[in-house]
Structures are given as structure tokens and as C-alpha cells.
Amino acid sequence: MKEEFLHWLWKNRLFDAGSVRDGDAGVIEVISPGEYNRDSGPDFFNTRLIIGGTTWAGNTEIHLNASDWYRHGHHTDRAYDNVILHIVYNNDAESFTASGRRLVTAAPSFDVSLWENYTDLVNNPSLLACEGFIAGVDPFMVRHWLWSLALERIGRKSEEVSDLLRQTGYDWEETLYRMVSRYFGFRVNTDSFGMLASRLPLKIIRKHADNLTQVEALLFGTAGLLDEALFREAVADSYYLLLCREFRMLRAKYSLQPVDGWMWKFHRLRPANFPTLRLSQLAALLSHTDGLFSRVMGCTGTDMLRALLSIRSSEYWNNHYLFGKEVPSAIRQAGRQSVDLLIINAVAPLIFVYGKSKQQPAMCERATDILESLPPEVNSVVSDFSSAGIRADSAFTSQALLELRLSWCRYHRCLDCHIGSSLIASGHKIKGSGSLLLEP
């Protein structure tokens, strides 16, 4: 038995009402189980009960064993003096508060199939434990739950943006530059791009924004990708040598410290996603007299954002993926899916944070509208949920599914998930008990 399971039973009032009784006080009528507390202190606040014809208001504490009250030290903690009910699975001892008051204690009964459904889910080794059963869950409840999860994910990303904003001294241009830079690396080179942006402030790039070659030299050089040991074939490449000369001058002028060029990953990447091309595209985006932040905020719709971020690498990359290695032709422009991921992960969260900081709800709505206007992301998580019966119709929904998988399914938080909770409480067996793997 799990204490969290007892919490779930109590929160959802799934005990047999007549079995909530104390040996001395008799049957206890539950008016409200109270508000679930995940922090320190009693498990439920503001519980309302009727005991012996008298209405009580206070807190509820839940344990597997009544004796856990003493094992956890609650009998000496004044914070638990206002507990009016002790719910237990095994009533093995009387409990008293620090003030000496005897606790009303009950070990109510419940339908054992609820526990079996719970163990079936948490013991399922599948990445999606409820796969095969989601289709039977109320679609309206699923939509409402996904909406909450999408907002939760936006909120979590907003905290990351806010942290970065504080680090940059509340410089919106620098913050957007660092956000966009990180996601130019996708998942494989995210950290490398982030390190590059932290070592090469935007204010330095802005001084050379009218010269694409110098911007490329700054980015490639600070990235450590002008190291001769990395591209031995480029020793006679005129463009590579030009960037090296430019960077030597700029490095001395700004005291730049390049990152280790060996940290960049090329292996198993499509050539179009090589960091060389992505850095050139980033240079093209930043080679503009107007700031990136003002251009992004000036976009009135998703199509304008796409047009802004659908940039091409410089002419050299027409027939190169690496320095010194010529190919017949190369893909110079960022694809639509890449651009959409940039909007989803960098632009929309920043717009949301800007709206919150400026107390402009319309700006926050604009961020969610952008996500709703974009197609769903293409990844294994979205595909798994689609196979299970939940199909994403926008990036807003696919972000919700990512949040569900990464923050809930991964940790088997089925009791806290509205879908999982609905299935556990559905009243029918999810799987045969013989398929259990272990006691949770």
C-alpha cells in the first residue's frame, strides 16, 4: 500500500462513507476532505466534518499506520495541533497531539479494484502506461487537462526566460539572442550554442551588424570552429582564411575567449543541421541594423514570424557543409519545421514573459495564439500519444503532450494525472492482476 494512494482516495472521496468511523466518536460525516497540501504540514487543510452532531473544521493527516504519527514526530509538533482527523490504513495505535488531545482516527474501507487498477498502471513498463485505454476517457476532460498542461509548460518555460532575463540585467535583446541561439542547436548542440552566446554578447555583434563576414567571423571564431586542427582541408580555402584573419583582429579587440571547437557535434546529424550551417544562418539573422527583439515584436502573425526566421546561410554555404569540403549543392535555408521549433521554444515563451512583466494580458494571449496557429511538433512523444488515441491538432497541444510525458508519465504520476485518475476510478480492471511486475 502507498500513502499517496490513500491521499488520492481521500481527495476524491472514494472511501466507503459508512466506514469512516472512530472507535469512540462513531461514524464521521465528511462534508469536505479539504485542500490537498504538497508542502510541509498536514496533508489536507480546511477539512470539514460532522462528528457526533457537531461540525468540525481543521486539518487531516494521512498515514499507512497510525503509529507513523509518532515515527514522524507529529506528537511533538505544534503545527499538527489543529489536525481533527487521522486517516490510516492500519489502525495500530492511538494518536495524541502535542497538546495531549486524542486524535479521532479512522481506517475506512474502499473498493480493492481501485488499488488493483493503480498497481496495473504504475507497474506497466511501457512509456505510456495507459496506452490502449485512453480512447475510453471523456474527451472533454482530456481537452481540459491538456489545456492545463500546456499552460503549465508555458509557465515553466517562462521561469527559464525570467531567470535568463535577470542574468542579462533585464536586457530583452540579449535575452532573446541567447534564447534563439540555444535553439539554433536543436537538442544535440543546444548547450554549445548557449555557451557561445554567453561568451559573445549581442552588443559586440551589433557593432558589426552591417558586415555579414565579420558577424560570421565573430560567431565561428568564438565557437572555436576556426581552429585549424578541426578543418585541415580548409588551409587553402579563401573564405575560411578570410574569417580567420577577421577573427584574429576582433578577438584581440574584444578580448574574446572561444569555446572548445571539439565540443560541437556533427555525428548522426543531417548535413542541413550541421552547426556550421546553423551558425551562418544565425549570423544572417543578426546581420541587421534593427534589433532582433524589435523585429520579432513587430510581427503581427505567425507567417511574419516564419518569414523573419526563415533565413539563408551566406553564399559560401551554397556548396559547402564544412570548411574546405565542396559539395555539388547544399541546403542553405532553415526548413519550416526548424523555424516552427524556434518559434515554439524561444519566441513564444519570451513574448509570454514580456506580456506578464508589462502587465499586458493581450501579449500573453498572443503567445498562446501563436502556439495554437502552428502545426503539432513531429516527434516520438506526439506519435506515441496519437497511436494511443490522443491526436495533437496544434503546437499548443503537442507542447501539452510533451509536458504530460516528461513531467507525469515518466514518473508514473498516474494518481495526479486526470487521465490516469479517471482510469483508476473507472470501476473496471485495467489488466489482470497476474500481469503485475512488482509492488509499488
Image (spheres, rainbow, N blue to C red):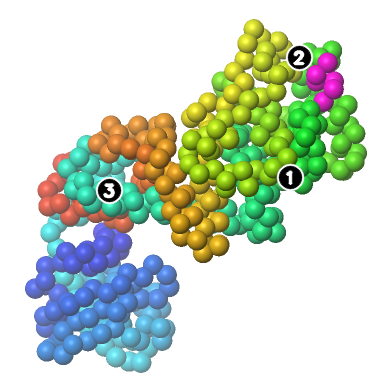
Which residue is label 1 attached to?
A: 202
Residue at image position (42%, 32%) is: 379
Q: Secondary structure at mark 3?
A: helix
* Residue 222 image offset from top left, x and y in percent: 78, 36
Residue at image position (28%, 32%) is: 387
The 10 Å Cα crowd at callout 2, few under 14, some 14 to 19, many 20 or more, is some
Magenta stretch? 238-243
Q: In the displayed structure, would residue 288 be above or below residue 88?
A: above
The mark lying in front, picked from 3 and 1, is: 1
The mark lying in front, picked from 1 and 2, is: 1
Instruction: Say which mark, if any, is on residue 143.
Output: 3
The 10 Å Cα crowd at callout 1, few under 14, some 14 to 19, many 20 or more, is some
- Residue 437 appears in view: no
The quarter holding residue 308 reads: top right
Residue at image position (67%, 49%) is: 173
Q: Three-letter amino acid code at disc 2?
A: Gly
Magenta stretch holds residue 128: no
Q: Nearer the viewer, residue 203 or 46?
A: 203
* Residue 33 image offset from top left, x and y in percent: 23, 73
Q: Nearer the viewer, residue 342 or 266?
A: 342
Q: Nearer the viewer, residue 438 or 42?
A: 42
The quarter holding residue 187 reads: top right
Left or right of 317 in this view: 398 = left
Asked if marks 3 and 1 touch (Cβ < 8 Å), the reply is no
The mark nearer the N terminus, 2 or 3, is: 3
* Residue 319 image offset from top left, x and y in percent: 67, 13
Q: Three-letter amino acid code at disc 3?
A: Arg
Instruction: Say which mark, if any, is on residue 324.
Output: 2
Residue at image position (35%, 32%) is: 383
Give the farthest residue toward the top: 328
Q: CA distance from mark 1 to mark 2?
A: 28 Å
Q: In the displayed structure, would residue 179 be above or below residue 100?
A: above
